[in-house]
Each structure stands twice: as C-alpha cells, then as structure tokens.
Image (cartoon, grey):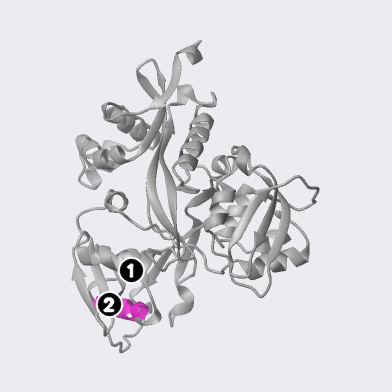
Amino acid sequence: MRQNNLKMRKLTPLHFEQYNQLLRYVFQVTEQTLNSIGWEERDIVRAKYPILEQAEIWGWFDNDNLVSQLAIYDMKINVFNQEYKMGGVTGVGTYPEYSNMGLMHKLLENALYIMQEKGQYISYLYPYSIPFYRRKGWEIISDKIYYEVQDYQLPKSEQVKGRVQRFQPESPEVYSAYERYSLCTHGAVIRNKAAWDEYWLWDNDDMTVAVYYNDNDEADGYLIYWIANDVFHVKDMIVMNEEAHIGLWNFISAHFSMIDKVKGYTYTGEPLAFLLDDASIKETISPYYMARIVDFEKFIEQYPFKKSESKREWIFNLVDPMMPCNDGTFCLEINKNGKGIAKKIHAETMDKISIQTMTAMLMSYKRPRYLHRIERLKTTMDKVTMLENSIEQRQPYISDYF
C-alpha cells in the first residue's frame, strides 16, 4: 500500500525546489501569473529561500518525493500591547492523489506541538478553506475591506499641521513608521526582515509609500500605493490618529486630475464610508486571517485583561479537537490588576466554549455578548457581563500575507 512508503519529516534546503513545485501546483501559480508581475520560475525559489531557511517546514514524503507540506514562520504579534510569539502557518498543500489520507491533519497536529515547544502560544494563518481550519481549531479574527471611491467622492482638502513625504517601499523610514504603529496596534504582526520580505513578495515594482509626519516629525502613518490606468491603488494605509488619516487622504485627493477613482483595502474592521462626506462608496467586507490559541494556560499567563475593583472567576469546559492540553474543564481566575491564571480542574459545569470561539473572543474579534447570543458561548448572563468587562474592545489589525 502507498501508506507504507509515507514518512513525515522535517525539510532541509535540499527540498526547497520540491516545496516550491508543490506550492505552485496547489495554488495554481501559472507562468502567466508570474509573468504579470515580472517573475520567472527561479525567482520564487531565490526570493523564498532566505525566508524558508528561517522557517520550520515539515512534510510527508513518498520515498524521496515530497507530497504534503506546511511551514511555520517564527513571528511576533501585539495582543493589546502585550508581545506574543506567534507561529505563522503557511505553504500548506497536498497533491490530490494523496488527499483524504489524514496527512494534513497530522502535519497540523505536529505543527501545534512544535509551536507549543517554542513558546508560540498563538498561531495565525490565511485560510484556503475556512471550514477546514475551523475543524482544526482556528477561527476568523480579522476582516479585509475592499473599497472604491470615485474621483468626485474624494474628500476636500483640510488643513493639518504635519507633512507627507514619499519613499521607496523598502526604505528604513517605512519600516520604522510601521514598527511604531505595530507596537501600539492590537493584532498587528511585529515584522522582522522575513515578515517584510513576505509582505512585499508578490507586489510589482511600482509601489510608493507616502509617510505622514506630525509637527514633531514623528511618523503617524503611511500609505502604500501605485497608480495605473487612471486608478489610484491603495495596498494599505495605517494611521495613529485622525490627523494622519486626513493628511493621507489630502495626499490622495491631490491626485484628482490624474485619476478616475481610488481602489484599495483597509484592515481595521471599520468601514471607510462613515468617514467620508460622500458615503455612497462601494465597500466589500470579507474574512481575512484566522488564529488559534495553541496553549490556553500559557496564553492566559501573558494575556492583559482589564483591571477591576475585585477578582473574577469562571469555571467552564473548553473543547479543542487537536490539543489535549486545551481540552477539559478550566478555572479562569483574574485578579484586580488584570493578571489571569487558567488551571485544569475536576468540576461539574454547564458552561462551555470551543477553542475557536475562545480565540475570537479573547482577540476581541467578536464580543462575549454576541457569542452568547448565537450560542457559541454557553454560560450565564452574569459571566457574560464579567467577560465583557474583562476583555478590551479593539478589533485586530492584520494586513500581512504569508
């Protein structure tokens, strides 16, 4: 039988050509796709090589042939101003003739234990199938909003104290502007060089970055864009405050005579329409990244709950389809200063929540009251109120793609 020849093992640089071939097959990266952004076959391997060298990559081999794979990037994120190590899952794929054999389930299970050992107590991934990853314990935690603004809908210029300066994408000024933003923005990836390399990987060479500096010469935001065929394309816009938001839209509006419309993306979870004078713009909201708590007890040790005048306690059943350490009855204790401790106990309780829902709740993508209403959080109303008062209310920002 074919299963007898299958072995799971860690990849080395000698396997990166096979990794690339499987990736291209699964995601149907054609020659036409590569040519459209000026890539050649060898360019992918060269560009990915430094990133893959830093990753933990595992796969199933049929004798010496790689047939199923995934990679774990060692990354960091901001969770309510608390830095977490994060395992970024990417490069997931299996050749079709090896599907329905449980190979990916075992790879993901192995990946979770590796993340646990490395202290990566939360994981991000971009899903090719939301139902598949939900069954494995991941849940949606962020949105991507696509918008179109016609030239006549552009906001009128307003006076601001700061200034805008343009840079090439990989300029130090751009990286330092994002670092300042990410260190105070919930959910953001705190990018190292590998994360930046992934962020730019599939972009063309026409990108420009406009950085907004306040009157103290501090970078309060930036706009990554390119102009083509009379369209102003926005890859991403980050702002620390409304002044920077106005300043960057002033910059976009200054292109009025050059463009017919603005097309772009925002990742804050807040629609753009409300902020514009003419709110009748086109906006489409779609789910973006998914996350999963890898080790619940360890995740809670670092988690910054809101402070309170008294300590809080919640006993509940946590359900995890893949990690036994997260499956069982827990007692969550939160002291007055917002420090939490979660311990497994032997107790009877009707309260119940899955690891998926717990992740969405603690990342504040969905609030406890809403999750209770749709019956994904089973508890009493007094516990719902306690959780509402204990969890910060800020949706995650994730604009990365890996």
Residue at 20% from the left image edge and 71% from the top image edge: 166
Where residue 18 sits: x, y (%)?
Answer: 31, 27
Q: Is residue 160 left or right of residue 268?
A: left
Q: Which residue is mark 1?
A: 180
Residue type pointed to by label 1: Arg
Report the magenta stretch's main SS: helix
Please give the range of residues in magenta: 244-257
Residue 390, by quadrant, is bottom right
Q: Is residue 62 visible?
A: yes
Asked if residue 310 lies in the magenta stretch, the reply is: no
Count of residue discs: 2
For label 1, the SS is: helix
Instruction: Please name whichever residue, 258 or 43, is drawn nearer the observer in this view of the structure.
Output: 43
Where residue 338 sits: x, y (%)?
Answer: 59, 67
Residue type pointed to by label 2: Glu
Residue at 63% from the left image edge and 70% from the top image edge: 336
- Give the answer, above or below, for where 239 lies relative to 156: above
Residue at 35% from the left image edge and 17% from the top image edge: 64
Q: Residue furthest bottom?
A: 159
Where residue 399 sits: x, y (%)?
Answer: 39, 58
Circles 2 and 1: CB distance less than 8 Å?
Answer: yes
Asked if residue 246 lies in the magenta stretch, the reply is: yes
Instruction: Please name whichever residue, 348 or 47, is drawn nearer the observer in this view of the structure.
Output: 348
Cα separation between marks 2 and 1 = 9 Å
For label 2, the SS is: loop
Q: Is residue 152 left or right of residue 270?
A: left
Residue 221, by quadrant, is bottom left
Q: Is residue 226 visible?
A: no
- Give the answer, above or below, for where 298 lies relative to 161: above
Q: Which residue is mark 2?
A: 218
Other-residue count near label 1 (Cα within 10 Å), few / some / many at <14 / 14–19 / ≥20 = some
Q: Residue furthest top?
A: 1
